[in-house]
């Protein structure tokens, strides 16, 4: 299903997204540039009083620092853009209505503890994929799902299972696996939050009359 050399899935790097900087008004961007220029020029002017070499050395140092920052920011933006294309491609080849990544903490008999996986909601089933390819490790029909909840951890890291919570940090779907009850826990969910998954799964279950 994945015919090119790209991986099936990749996560965005940690840290603030380069997309956030595009949301700042131009006014703030202009002032940030002015402040940077003052920070470079004023010390250079003061150092030049003692030695012209010190002034030029400071300017050269600041130019190198800002050039490195610009190249790093450009590289990060290109990396994030490429990851966006990988994620969109994964969603398209599966025909998924919802897709993201998570760590399966424990509970699923076919998966390892703390295994990174890519859940995908495809038609009336919840697929669980590896990062490497589009072949699912398991496919859970939504008719076998017996409950969709969310988990919120309190200040003492004690999990609180809720029907739905906006600040949810994990998702523990309960389902039948080979006619046996099974509950696994998805944590560190990226691309789509636990509440997004709750909404997407429940929406399909209710529309298809599968919710009980």
Image (cartoon, grey):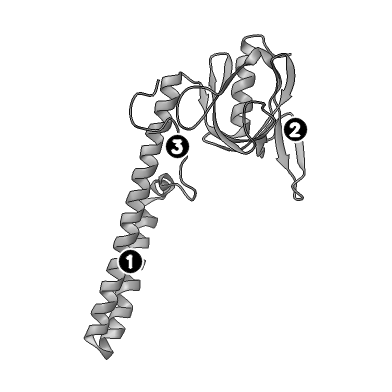
Report which quarter residue 110 is drawn in: top right
Contact, mark 3 vs mark 2 (Cβ under 8 Å) = no
Q: Is residue 113 visible?
A: yes
Near-viewer residue (114 or 166):
114
Asked which secondary structure carries label 1, the reply is helix
- Residue 33, compared with residue 40, is above or below; it is above
In the rendered image, residue 178, in percent from the top left (x then y), is placed at 69, 15
Compare marks 1 and 3 and give the one earlier in the sequence. Answer: 3
In the rendered image, residue 147, in percent from the top left (x then y), is placed at 72, 22
Nearest to viewer (mark 1 / mark 3): 3
**Disc sitting over residue 10 in the figure:** 3
Near-viewer residue (50 or 114):
114
Compare marks 1 and 2 and give the one earlier in the sequence. Answer: 1
| Separation of residues labelled 1 and 2 (CA atoms) | 48 Å
Near-viewer residue (32 or 186):
186
Q: Name the residue: 71% across, 36% down.
A: 151
Q: Quadrant of the C terminus?
A: top right
In the rendered image, residue 64, in percent from the top left (x then y), is placed at 29, 67
- Circle 2 residue: 162
Report which quarter residue 204 is drawn in: top right
Asked which secondary structure carries label 2, the reply is strand
| Separation of residues labelled 1 and 3 (CA atoms) | 30 Å
- Circle 1 residue: 65
- Residue 43, compared with residue 21, is above or below; it is below
Asked which secondary structure carries label 3, the reply is loop
Label 2 Cα neighbours within 10 Å, binned few <14 / some 14-19 / many ≥20 = few
């Amino acid at each position: 299903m994945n015919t090119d050399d790209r991986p099936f899935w990749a996560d965005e790097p940690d840290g603030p997204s380069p997309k956030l900087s595009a949301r700042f008004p131009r006014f703030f961007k202009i002032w940030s540039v002015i402040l940077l220029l003052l920070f470079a020029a004023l010390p250079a002017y003061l150092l030049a009083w003692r030695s012209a070499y010190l002034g030029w050395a400071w300017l050269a140092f600041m130019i190198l620092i800002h050039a490195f920052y610009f190249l790093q920011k450009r590289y990060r933006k290109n990396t994030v853009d490429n990851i966006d294309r990988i994620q969109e491609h994964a969603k398209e080849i599966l025909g998924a209505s919802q897709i993201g990544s998570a760590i399966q903490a424990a509970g699923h008999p076919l998966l390892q503890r703390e295994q990174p996986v890519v859940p995908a909601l495809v038609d009336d089933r919840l697929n669980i994929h590896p990062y490497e390819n589009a072949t699912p490790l398991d496919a859970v029909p939504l008719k076998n799902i017996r409950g969709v909840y969310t988990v919120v951890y309190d200040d003492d890291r004690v999990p609180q299972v809720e029907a739905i919570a906006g600040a949810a940090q994990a998702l523990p779907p309960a389902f039948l696996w080979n006619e046996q009850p099974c509950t696994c826990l998805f944590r560190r969910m990226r691309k789509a939050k636990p509440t997004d998954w709750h909404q997407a799964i429940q929406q399909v279950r209710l529309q298809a009359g599968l919710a009980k």
